[in-house]
Amino acid sequence: MSEVAEREAREMGEERYLRKIKELDMVWRLNEQIMSFRDLNSLLQSILKAAIEVMEATSGSIMLIDPPGSDTMVIKASHGLRRDVVERARVRVGEGIAGMVAERREGMLLLDDLMDPRLRTRRRVSDALSVPIIAEGELLGVLNLNTKKGQAFGEFDLFLINTLIKQIASAIERGKTLEDLRARLTRLEEEERRIVEEIRRLDQLQDEKRREYQRIRHEHDKLLRDLQGLSGPVA
C-alpha cells in the first residue's frame, strides 16, 4: 500500500472512530435528558445544546411543526440567535431554507444548495447545515446548526448529524409523549380532587339532612303524642 493510501485509510479510520465517539456522546446526553425530563421546552433546549457541542457549532435552533398537523414551523429552542429573530420566526414547509429541508425531508449542507433559485436571495450560508426531524415517518420539524465562517461543515458533519437525528427525533417524540401523559395525569388528578371534594360536600350535606330529619321526626312524634293526649275523654 502506498504512503498516500495508508494516510487516507488512517484518516478514514480516525473519522469513523470520531463519529462513533460523537454518536455515543450524543446518545448518552439524550438518555440523560430523558431520565431527568422536566418539560418539553427544557428537553428541546438541552437537545440543541448537546447537538451544538457535539457538532462543534456556535449557534442553532430547533423548529417544530406548530400547531400539530399544520405546515407551519416555529422555533422552540435556540442558542446564539437574537430574541426578536426567534419570536418572529414562522416558516411554512417549502419556504426558505428550513422550509425546503422540511419539504425535501433530507439534510442540506447549505453551500451545495445555493444554486436553488429559492435560496439565491438569502445570505451566504456555507457555514450552516439543516436536517429534518422525522419520527416514524412524521415530520416533527427541522434542526439548524451554524458555525463560524472558515470552519464550514463538511460531508462528514452532514453524515454524522443525519445519523444522530434519529436519536434526536426519538427523544423529542418521547418528550412530547411524556408531556402529554403528564398533562393528562394532571387533569385526571384535578378531576379526582374535584370529585372527592364533591363527595365530601355531599357527605356533609347528607349529615346535615340526617340531623334535620331527626329533628323533624322528633317534633312529629311529640306533636303526635300531644294530639293523641288531647283526643282522649275529658276528665
Image: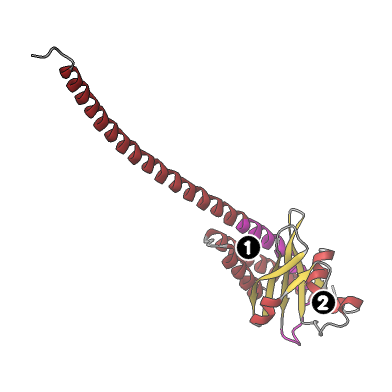
Would residue 63 be found to the left or right of residue 93 on screen?
Answer: left
Q: Which mark is residue 27?
A: 1
Q: Which of disc 1 and disc 2 is earlier in sequence?
A: 1
- What span is colored magenta in the figure? 148-176
Q: Nearer the viewer, mark 2 or mark 1?
A: 2
- Measured from the top left, where is residue 213 in percent x and y? 29, 31
Q: Residue furthest left?
A: 235
In the foreground, 11 or 106: 106
Task: Name which quarter of the figure residue 176 lies in.
Answer: bottom right
Give x and y (percent) for residue 203: 35, 38
**Can residue 222 be spotted in the picture?**
yes
Secondary structure mostly seen in magenta is helix
The residue that disc 2 covers is 110
| One can see residue 155 in this view | no
Examine the structure image and report whether residue 169 is included in the region drawn in magenta: yes
Of the pair 170 and 7, the residue shown nearer to us: 170
Amino acid carrying label 2: it is: Leu
Provide residue 226's location: percent of width, then percent of height.
Answer: 17, 22
In-image side of 71 versus 35 (left or right): right
Q: Residue at x 68, y 73 (%)?
A: 61
Whether residue 210 is in magenta: the answer is no
> Disc count in the image?
2
Check the image and report above or below for 17 versus 166.
below
Q: Does 61 appear above or below 66? A: below
Q: Quadrant of the C terminus?
A: top left
